[in-house]
Image (cartoon, grey):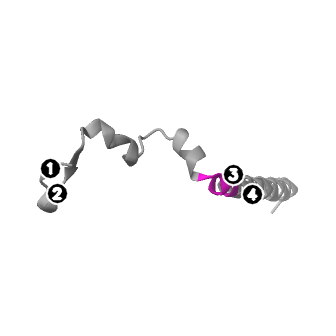
Amino acid sequence: MNLAGVEIILNMREKMGEMQTQIQEFIASLNRELAARTARPPEIEGRNSLIPVVSALAPALGGMVAGPGGSRRNR
């Protein structure tokens, strides 16, 4: 191996170390975000949902609920 090859290998090792540090920082930030989201009360999460909450759909169904065997009946 010549000196140019050694230099390339050393540079790659340095870049790999930097990337490893960045990955560890990214994982730590993901863990912090996950902890913050799970610590929020459920009512805050419900207001930010993109999908309607099931209990919010009940009035829109006009009082219809699924009965035994999946058939719908009025309440």
| Residue type highlighted by circle 4 | Ala
First-in-chain label (3 vs 1): 3
- Residue 55 locus on image (x, y percent): 39, 47
Q: Which residues are magenta?
A: 35-41
Q: Determine which quarter of the picture holds residue 64.
A: top left
Task: Tell me whether circle 3 and circle 1 mark residues in contact (CB < 8 Å).
Answer: no
Q: Which mark is residue 28?
A: 4
Alpha carbon of mark 3 to alpha carbon of mark 4: how far? 9 Å
| Residue type highlighted by circle 1 | Arg
Task: Tell me whether circle 2 and circle 1 mark residues in contact (CB < 8 Å).
Answer: yes
First-in-chain label (3 vs 4): 4
Task: Tell me whether circle 4 and circle 2 mark residues in contact (CB < 8 Å).
Answer: no
Residue of label 3: 33
- Residue 72 locus on image (x, y percent): 14, 50
- Residue 40 locus on image (x, y percent): 65, 52
> For the residue labelled by badge 3, is the local secondary structure a helix, a strand or a loop?
helix
First-in-chain label (4 vs 2): 4
